[in-house]
Amino acid sequence: MTDHSSSADGAGEGWPSQQPAPPQLSAEAARSQVAAAWVRVAPQSNVPPGQVAVPSLPPRADRPAAESKKDKREQAKAERKAEYERKRAARKAEYESKQAARASRKGGGKVSASATSAATTASAATTASAEAAAPTAGAGPSAAQDAPAPAPARSGARGPDARFDVPRPGGRLPSNGRSTHVALRATLLITTCVFALGSCGVTGLVIGRSSVSVKPAALDGKDLDRYRLTDFPVQSAAVFAEEYASLCMTYAPENTDKRRESLSRYISAGVDRDCGWNGKGKQQVKQANWDGTVEELPEYGKNGRYLNIQVTYTGGRTTTLSVPVYVKDLAGASGLRVVGNVGEMPLPIRDTAPALEKSEEVVDQELSAQLREQVLAGYFKAWAASDTTALTRFTTPDATPAAVSGLAGALTAPVVQEVQALAPEGTEVGKKPTYTQGQAVPARVTVVWGGGGADDAKAEVALKRSYRVTVVNTAQGWFIKDIHGGVMDPTGGRADTPSTASPTAAPASGASAPPAPAAPSAPSGGASPGLPASPKPAASAPAP
């Protein structure tokens, strides 16, 4: 029997020479045969139940042994340490080289031996650290295959093959990590401060008080008097006083009882029911109107007022009655009552009007004649009849309603008597003014109307009326844009002869009376004295 477990010195030794060598087996088959042979020759010992002896098989050649996690951590730690030593040596070498260059510049180009040796030492340390990180040359193919490749030096490479460092959790970035961390902290700190200051400002605006005192929006007594603002229902009280004044100043003996009964519905218990009439004579009121005068009634405070009513009789006389009126409900204007006897007062004082200054006014005579003959004559004829078709020939597209509506036949047969077209401001006397397209020019027009305005249609009536017309210069000529009635009188003064001097116009004691207003001079450009000028008060001379 041949011993297959004995060692053999050569290939095929232990087999009979006359027999051929067995064929080469695969690795799996060889491992199976080794395991079976071990089981046969292994001594049988008492093995407790549940434990089985397992043979130690050689590792497979095609499957390298897996590294444990501990080995990987140790290997990574070694790589990081080697990288750190390399960088440290490189920084030291760079520092030494700078020191050597600085010493060389100071010493005139001679490099010291110590600086040279330091640089050499730093280079050797860098090389040693790089070799320590690389796998040993004596390692087998499996070790060389499993060992990671040494980290290349950072040369600023970019792209997918570039190497970068990943910090461990909680650690700092290996490159520019400290500066980035400081910048992040500074940004967070500044942002927090800005939010804190904004919160403080908003809180101060919401719950704080202004240091500047603000005047209340409510109106005081002076403002109420200045603008005539009151809670008293003036309009309702004025209508009530007008009715009472008409009944009071209208009387006749045959209507005594009826008049007394009507008056008692307006007055309080102590007021004269006959309104001061003795029962004799007759009088008829034509019109009674409130003149806008209001005086406070102190006894009733804000609920009472004196109202002045202007009364005109059928005979032509006009007077003023002061009527005390009480109003119980100011908001609803109800509970009205005449709470006192009336008093007759003089009419409001009339005074002289000041003369108007017209020295700076220049009238364009050429334009005035053109407007009178070519524009205004046809316009006033169409305006009197409210002929909208004809009015479109003389008015601008944006003309006012007053300029395109007309009088609807109230006046007829217009004759333009006088036209004064005012030249632009700054025009010198004697020079022809120039007008740009679209420029508006004011003009004063006097028109004499005939055949209307009287109850008797057959009567030959002539009415002179004055108007303020605005004309516009266009590419097709002059067109009318607006019209207003009434023109100011530049003369001023008063037409009547006052029987008594006005309190405001009476001179002081011992002072001479002011001179009479001078006669108006003709306007610039040849305007007639009878036509009014622009309203501009003249400066009055100081009293002597």
Image (spheres, grey):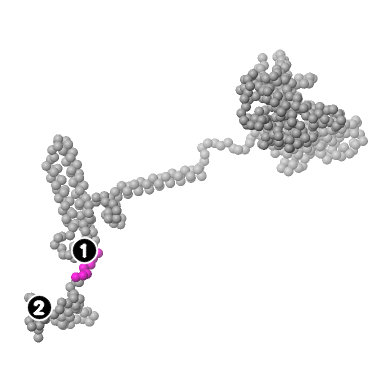
139 to the left or right of 218 = left
Q: Label 1 belongs to which residue?
A: 146
Q: Label 2 belongs to which residue?
A: 12
Does 67 lie within the magenta span?
Answer: yes
Q: Amino acid at mark 1?
A: Asp
| Circle 1 SS class | helix
| Circle 2 SS class | loop
The C terminus: image quadrant: top right
Q: Residue furthest bottom?
A: 1
Q: Residue at x 67, y 19 (%)?
A: 524
User: Secondary structure of the magenta portion, mostly?
Assistant: loop
The N terminus: image quadrant: bottom left
First in sequence, mark 1 or 2: give its number.
Answer: 2
Residue 199 rendering spot, x and y as whole percentages = 46, 46
Q: Amino acid at mark 2?
A: Gly
Q: Residue at x 13, y 80 (%)?
A: 22
Q: Residues within 10 Å of mark 2 (few under 14, many from 20)?
A: few
What stretch of residues is rendered in magenta?
61-70
Residue 7 appears in the rendering: no
In the rendered image, the vertical position of residue 302 relative to residue 496, given as above or below:
below
Q: CA distance from mark 1 to mark 2?
A: 36 Å
The one nearer the camera, 423 or 484, is: 423
